[in-house]
Image (tube, rainbow, N blue to C red):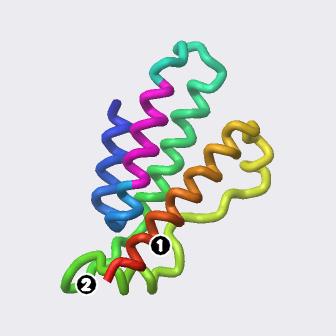
Amino acid sequence: MRLYRRCLRLHRQKLPAVQRSVGDEYCKKEFRAQRELPEDSQFHQSFFTSWEDYCAELDEFKPMEGSKGWSKDLIREQAMLGRDLKQSELDMMSEEQKEQLNKLKESTIEARDKLFNES
């Protein structure tokens, strides 16, 4: 539960509204689904290790702060938050995980485009 709260806190501190919204929803879904797994599941340890790695990486982000905080212009100027997955990380994913990752990517692009088209 501490890891879950840490993820949400880091989202609040480090991400712009659009990414925070998508990230929070994804985080909530994943942690809810994980509760259904038995403690001795082969995925249990890798789940927590992956989220701890994510938090460590997110902790390194420097939030963009301007006079108005996260503005559309600042988000557009930001090259990229996060990183591309390594091929070895992709190779370890199941087809279901790859499909879920693609859905997350599409949701993020949709949310970004929606923000950029609002004016």
Are there few (<14), some (14-19), or many (20+) residues within 10 Å of tag 1?
Answer: few
User: Quarter-wise, where is residue 22 in the image?
Assistant: bottom left
Q: Is residue 80 left or right of residue 86?
A: left
In magenta stretch: residue 32: yes
Could you tell me which residue is drawn at 76 percent across and 41 percent down? 92
Image point 33% across, 47% down: which residue?
8
Frontmost residue, 77 versus 57: 77
Element carrying mark 1:
helix
Using the image, determine if residue 34 lies above or below residue 82.
Answer: above
Q: In the displayed structure, does residue 64 sit left or right of residue 66?
A: right
Amino acid type for the residue under numbered disc 1: Asp
In the rendered image, which residue does mark 1 sit on?
113
Residue 111, image x, y percentages: 44, 64
Q: Residue at x 44, y 58 (%)?
A: 58
Residue position for label 2:
66
Span of residues in magenta: 22-34
In-front residue for pair 83/95: 95
| Foreground of the two, 113 or 93 | 113
Q: Residues within 10 Å of mark 2 (few under 14, many from 20)?
A: few
Q: Position of residue 110 (x, y in %)?
A: 50, 64
Q: Earlier in the sequence, mark 1 or mark 2?
A: 2
- Distance between the alpha carbons at the discs numbered 1 and 2: 22 Å
- Indicate whether 56 appears above or below 119: above
Q: Give how far across and how far down residue 47 sits, in percent.
A: 56, 33
Element carrying mark 2: loop
Magenta span: predominant SS is helix
> Toward the viewer: 87 or 68?
68
Task: Please say if 16 is above or below 75.
Answer: above
